[in-house]
Image (cartoon, rainbow, N blue to C red):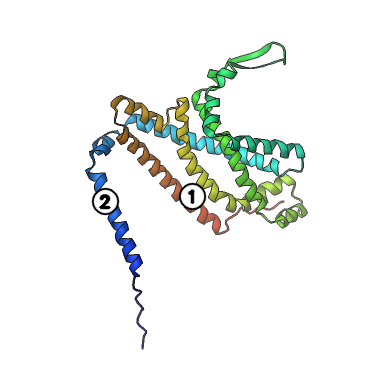
Amino acid sequence: MASRPVLKRKRPGQLIAMVVVGLFALMGAYILVTNPGFGWPTVAKYLFDVRILNGLLTTIELTVIAMILGFVIGLVVAVMRMSENGLLRGVAGAYIWFFRGTPLLVQMLFWGFAAVLFPTIGIGIPGGPMLVEWNTNDVLPLFVAGILGLGLNEGAYMAEIVRAGLMGVPAGQSEASHAMGFSRMETLRYVVIPQAMKIILPPVGNETISMLKTTSLVIVIGVGDLLYNTQQIYARNLQQIPLLIVASLWYILLTTLLSMVQSRIEKRYSRGNVLQVRKA
């Protein structure tokens, strides 16, 4: 005789929790629909406004370029931190100490006001005349200043992520690689880094999502990103809440897409798909 499936009864506490959560959800939905302060018609009007879309494109560009810069810097600094050379370790440690120890907003403002410290940038003889000279504002426009502020700060955090990933690869892998005739750089490139990616990728994905939202700090130096353009619009029509909802919806959409990509990449690497190479 086949056994009947056992139906689990919900406990009173679970039922009460479900009712409470359901009531709060209904209250929230009611407020969103009935409160005119949210200005949903205004949200619909500006959601695809060309100024919003231009700011969105700038935000994406800032995120991509800053993350690439941060990852490259982080990889170099991580290798320096693991070097046997004391000077390289010291320089890498000082870099991480400085950029992690000061607020990103302050760093961003310094880059925005770089022309105050250095009105011109050039190449010349120390203590002598300048051979070539440029105006700092021409060499360092606000968009570039924003990228440097975001990328250099990210590099300090990325260095610790990469270093943790590299240290997570068993030492025997490097020893076996050296025994096969691989150089130190070849071992790092073909053996250590591909295996370390399993450890590195999850936090890098989180850093990318965080970077997308952190780009909003470039508003303080006047870069026309999503939040800056949103602010410019509501400064004229005084529709602060609806315009901020527009910006929030775009941020939520982008972070959701990035989370989906991150999940797919993590699943791929979790199956052990690392680079296989042979030395001829």
Q: CA distance from mark 2 to mark 1?
A: 33 Å
Residue at the (49%, 24%) spot, across then down: 142
Residue at the (43%, 44%) spot, across then down: 255
Q: Is residue 17 above or below residue 103?
A: below
| Left or right of residue 181, residue 233 in this image | left
Instruction: Quadrant for residue 233, please give it.
Output: top left
Secondary structure under badge 2? helix
Q: Is residue 88 above or below residue 136?
A: below
Q: Nearer the viewer, residue 167 or 193?
A: 167
Crowd around label 2: few <14 · some 14–19 · many ≥20 (10 Å) = few
Q: Nearer the viewer, mark 2 or mark 1?
A: 2
Marks 2 & 1, CB-CB < 8 Å contact: no
Q: Nearer the viewer, residue 154 or 262?
A: 154
Q: Quadrant of the N terminus?
A: bottom left
Instruction: Quadrant for residue 9, please give it.
Output: bottom left
Image coordinates of residue 261 in percent, x first then y, are 46, 49
| Left or right of residue 140, residue 79 in this image | right
Pointer 2: what residue? Answer: 27
Q: Is residue 167 above or below residue 53?
A: below
Q: Amino acid at mark 2?
A: Met
Q: Amino acid at mark 1?
A: Gln
Pointer 1: what residue? Answer: 262
| Left or right of residue 233, residue 144 in this image | right
| Left or right of residue 90, residue 245 in this image | left
